[in-house]
Structures are given as C-alpha cells and as structure tokens.
Amino acid sequence: MNLLGWRSKIKEVKRFGLTEIALFLTGLGKRERESLYRALEDTAIKKIPHIHLRTDMSPEEIDYLMKTYKVEVFNLHPTVQWPLIYDYSKYFSKIYIENAETVPSESELKKMGGLCVDFSHWEGKRLENDQNYDKRMEYMAGIYKIGCAHISAVKDKPTPVVINKKIEMYDSHILDDLSEIDYIKKYKKYLPNIISIELENSIKKQLEAKEYIEKIISDSK
C-alpha cells in the first residue's frame, strides 16, 4: 500500500477484506504514521511481509511493526544519500538496500541483508541509456541476495515529476495501462519471493496489477 491518500486506501482494504499488504512509509512523518497504525489496527490485516522504512523511525517503532505484523523484510534507500539516524544494527539482516538514483555500494550491501531491486528504476535507467548504472546493477544483482523488490509502471516516454526539482522519468508510481508492467519480463531471473507493488493507484487497480504480474511470472516458468 503506497501512502499517498492512505485513508482512502484503508477504506478499500476493509472493503476487499485484505489480510496482507506491503507498506511504503516514505511519504509519512511520525504523527501521520501513528494515525495510520491506529487505522490499520481496525482492519483485517494480519501480516505485512515487506515495509519500506524511513530513517526517522525509531527502533521501538520497528519493533512494534515486527511484533504486530510479522514483517519478514524491510528496505531503505542508499544510506549514503539518506544516512541512518538510529542504530538499526539488530535489524541489518532483514534490511535490503534499494537502487534509487544511485546503485547501492558494496559496503552497505555487505553490512545489510542485501539488495532490494526496484525494477522500474533499473528499467528507467536502461531507457535513459545509463550503461554504468545498468552494468553495476547486473553485477550487484548477480552476487548479492535479492531479499525483496518493487514494481512500478514504466512509461513509453519520460514524464515530468517533482521530487527536489522538476525532472523527467520513465518510471512512475501511476499506472495508466497494465502493459506498463510488461518490462518485468526482462528481469524474471532476478525476481525474489517477496515482490511489492509500488503504485499510488487505488487498491482495486493494484489488485489488477497483482494478478497481471502473477500471470507474467507463471508464464515465464
């Protein structure tokens, strides 16, 4: 569950009777997260296998999530760009570092559980013809454990987004057509057991994407 407009998604979680989700907390500060946790406790969710952490989350907050939702893996952005605030050493074996604008360093992959592959970022860099990024990802994905992954949409043309500045990117958290997931066929050998959909679309649309991805995976076996 991506967290933009999370209250409407909580309503959908209830409507569909979901008992398991992934959770991306990157857009929420502490108070907003506390509100989200209270809302989640009023749903049927029993398990959250994968959570995208923020570095402002205390160990106590992580302990709560692990105890309540049987979390198997976490991911973080590269710590060179987003340094750790707290001591997460007791969780290192469960934390996987995501490829974002940069490819994670070997030193942090060795220290943590391994790699969280965001396939849309990787595909976007390939479409930008960033050969250095592509080669480094192939190398890292070939030797380090891939503990979890993100799948988002990839567009035919780069679209404007605003992060710290306005840029254009091929990868997007908005899915307009299921064919925007087809690129994942290129990466089937890298797919881990835990794959999370990172989209801002409604839960209904995300469930359609989930079914579509499952078909791609089953067809590739």
Image (cartoon, grey):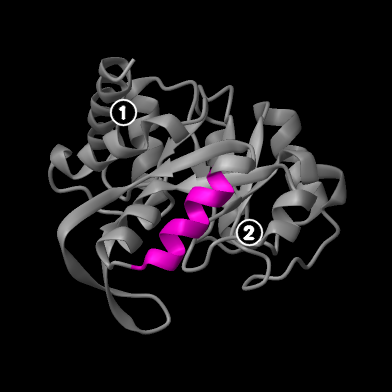
Q: CA distance from mark 2 to mark 1?
A: 25 Å
Is 9 left or right of 108, judged from the image as shown?
A: left
Q: Is residue 135 magenta?
A: yes
Which residue position holds label 2?
Answer: 54
Circle 2 — which element?
Answer: loop
Magenta segment, prevailing SS (helix, strand or loop): helix
Above or below residue 115? Residue 167 is below
Residue 152's disc is none
Looking at the image, how many numbered discs can be counted on the residues? Answer: 2
Which part of the image, by quadrant, shows the N terminus? top left
Is 80 left or right of 174, judged from the image as shown?
A: right
Q: Quadrant of residue 114?
A: top right
> What amino acid is at disc 2?
Arg
Which part of the image, by quadrant, shows the C terminus? top left
Above or below residue 47? Residue 172 is below
Residue 123: image location, x then y, percent: 32, 53
Residue 210's disc is 1
Residue for point 50% across, 22% down: 44
Q: Quadrant of residue 14?
A: top left
Residue 173 appears in the picture as rendered: yes
Residue 201: image location, x then y, percent: 26, 46
Magenta residues, as a range? 130-141
Above or below residue 188? Residue 39 is below
Q: Is residue 54 magenta?
A: no
Residue for point 39% across, 76% down: 163
Residue for point 50% across, 27% down: 43
Residue 107: image location, x then y, percent: 75, 59
> What amino acid is at disc 1?
Lys
Label 2 or label 1, whichever comes before in sequence order: 2
